[in-house]
Structure formats: C-alpha cells, structure tokens
Image (cartoon, rainbow, N blue to C red):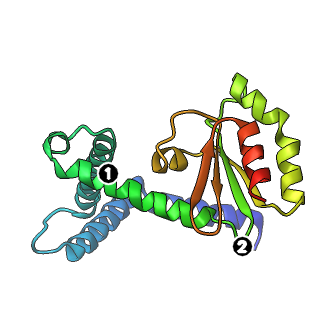
Amino acid sequence: MRIEDRLKNLRKAMTNTTLKNVRADKQELKQKVLKEADKRKSPFFPWNPRPLLQSAISIVGVGVLCIFIMYFGLSRSGFWLNEANDPNIEEGKQADVEELNEQLTERSLADQEGTYNIIIVHDGNKDTEAAQKWEEVKNEIFLLEQKQTVDRVDYVVTSEYKKAFQLNQFPVALIFNTEKLVYMSTNPNEVISYINSYS
C-alpha cells in the first residue's frame, strides 16, 4: 500500500471518530468505576470508612500517649496529692532504702577471707579539695590492692550508694569485708591506715 493510500485511510478514520465519541467513552468508563465502588461499599457505611477509622485510631493513640506522658511525668516529680498525704509512702521509701542497702552490700563484699573491698563513691565533681586528696593517694590504694590486702577497689559515681548508705560528703570510702560494711571515711589517709592496721 502506498503512502497516499494510507493517508486517505487515516483521514477517513479521523472523520468517522469524533470528539463526541471520545467523551461518550469517557463517561461510560466513569460509570463503570462508580458501579464497582458501589459494590464494594458496606450496607452499614454508605461512604468509605477507611479514612474515618484511620483518623479515629490516630486521635485515640495520641490521647493515650499524652495520658501516659502526663501520668509518669507527674508521678516522678511527686505531683500527685495522694502521695503527699499518704503516711505509708515514707515507710515504703524506707523499705526501698533498706532493700537497696542489702543489695549493694551483697554486691560490694570482698571475695576472699582476710581481704577488703573498697568502694570509693564520688559525686562527679573532681575539682574539690577532697577529690584532689583522693587523687594524690590513688597509687597508695593501688599498692594495697597489689599486696592482696585489698580484693578490689572500685571508683563509682552513682546515686545508689548515696541513697542506700545515706551519704552526704564526697568522696567517701566504704570498706567491706566478706560479711558486711566495716568502715567508712572521707579521709583517704584514715582508709589506708585502717587497711594496714587490720592486714
């Protein structure tokens, strides 16, 4: 077929297909889509419930999160009035301190008979005069550990020891034998003398 014949056929086809036919096809397609959407709708929900459900779940989730944050945030700061008026709260705190004391004592005991375990509790401030004194005698304490007089020496910065042993001066050394806390001092020289006198 020649090019001129092809062009004739193309012109003929274009005149037969009008814009009106294209619009009719578009309308027919739209009707089909709407019918399919109607079939999928539930008899209880004449509209699509998915966006509504998603937004409802999001709102509930945000609400629960806000309540959770408020409850734990306020309860930690002691905001609730019933805590201030409840006499059993103080007893509970005392019981917690005693339990913490037992746990830390058990964890801090020396492993071998005739040796000591030294826990030096800092408050995190190394610039104080007391902290400088402890830095100066660090080597002497290390030598005690080498002589096997001391099982181990731990330097800790933790509020657990402060709470359990009701400490208010830092640094402080807690000396444990295999059974219990035997000595406590804020003076490093006294700690060294104590270890040397009982070894």
State the image coordinates of residue 160 (x, y, percent, origin top left): 52, 50
Task: Describe residue 26's horizontal placement relative to residue 64 as left or right.
Answer: right
Residue lying at the far front in this picture: please name it.
197
State the image coordinates of residue 164 (x, y, percent, origin top left): 47, 51
Q: Quadrant of the N terminus?
A: bottom right
Pick the front one: 26 or 85: 85
Pick the front one: 131 or 43: 131
Say which mark, if any, is on residue 113.
Answer: 2
Say which mark, if any, is on residue 93.
Answer: 1
In this picture, is 42 found above or below 167? below
Near mark 2 (Cα within 10 A), the count class, few <14, some 14-19 or many ≥20, is: few
Q: Quadrant of the C terminus?
A: bottom right
Task: Describe residue 79's horizontal placement relative to residue 138 as left or right.
Answer: left
In this picture, is 33 found above or below 90? below
State the image coordinates of residue 185 (x, y, percent, origin top left): 63, 41
Q: Amino acid at mark 1?
A: Lys
Q: Amino acid at mark 2?
A: Glu
* SS at mark 2 in the image: loop
